[in-house]
Image (cartoon, rainbow, N blue to C red):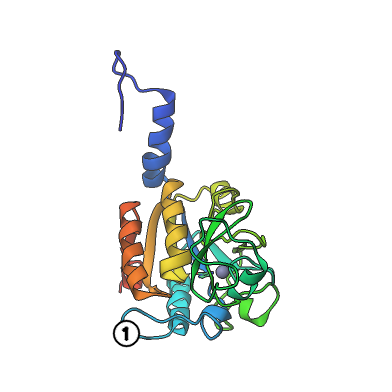
Amino acid sequence: QLDENKDGKISLQEFKACWRYWFKQILSPVSALIIIDVQNDFISGSLALKHCPSGQDAEEVVPVINKLLDEVNFDVVVYTRDWHPADHISFAENAKHREMDHSSLVSSEDAKLFDVVRFAGPPVTEQKLWPTHCVQNSVGAEYHKDLKIVDNSFNISKGSHSNIDSYSAFWDNMKLSQTPLAKELGKRNVTDVYLCGLAFDICVSFTSIDAAEHGFRTTVIEDACRSVDCTDALKMKNKMKEAGCVIVNSQHVIPDM
Ligand code: VGL
Ligand code: ZN
């Protein structure tokens, strides 16, 4: 949206916005594939995911992602991982040792798996309670053994602070602190990000919405993702589209398919 002043000129600030969101992407696009949380616990472990609605399992994303790595010339590749300490706030088994906010609908004693509770903090946070998963240095936190790790890629760990969860690979869930992801993409002049991995309705969707908000042209490769919950997948798909993300299948980004 341009506001010309009286002389028909635009401000430097407006020009910069045009450059960042528009010209730079056309004149010198730089692409990054962001591979979200392809870790054992989301495939064969405590939080094994299913495809919606057909029930295919999460392991099937691995060859699709490997094919993307082989056949598409991404300038940058990023692997993210959920990387929780054992006392992490998102684990249902830890909830009974934590104080709830007075507004929480569930008490510490009653809290059970998949409940949404409000912890006293600080900061006060709404949290869905998950099975224990992706504990730092555990086998469950390792990338799937068949996932290709390419040269010149980098890793982003998230959810490493005990008292706050991080679905997005850019921000914690309260947007209090950022991971290095935005800075690292910026350093490499990335304009376009492509997302795939686990889980579509949680970490992929939160990361893609933040990517669009950061001004990246954002594409989500849906057949290279799996979800925790099919209803949430539909809901989050609409939110991603509202945020400006484009949702495609791998055949749309692999040349000559
Ligand atoms: C995730 C649930 C809890 C994810 C992480 O990577 O999608 N889901 N922690
Ligand atoms: Zn997690």
Say if 86 sits above or below 243 in the image.
Answer: below
Name the foreground residue: 9 vs 87: 87
Position of residue 216 measured from the top left corner of the image (x, y, whole percent): 43, 50
Q: Is mark 1 within 8 Å of ligand 1?
A: no
Q: Residue at x 57, y 56 (%)?
A: 101
Considering the numbered disc 1 on the image, is that residue within a helix, a strand or a loop? loop
Name the foreground residue: 167 vs 37: 167
Which image quarter holds the C terminus? bottom left
Say if 78 sits above or below 199 in the image.
Answer: above
Which image quarter holds the N terminus? top left
Say if 26 sits above or below 223 in the image.
Answer: above
Structural crowding at the residue carrying mark 1, measured as other residues with C-alpha within 10 Å and reported as few (<14), some (14–19) or many (≥20):
few
Name the foreground residue: 249 vs 253: 249
Amino acid type assigned to the residue bearing label 1 in the image? Ser
For mark 1, what is the residue?
A: 54
Q: Residue at x 37, y 80 (%)?
A: 51
Name the foreground residue: 87 vs 166: 87
Position of residue 111 measured from the top left corner of the image (x, y, whole percent): 55, 72
Position of residue 96 measured from the top left corner of the image (x, y, whole percent): 63, 71
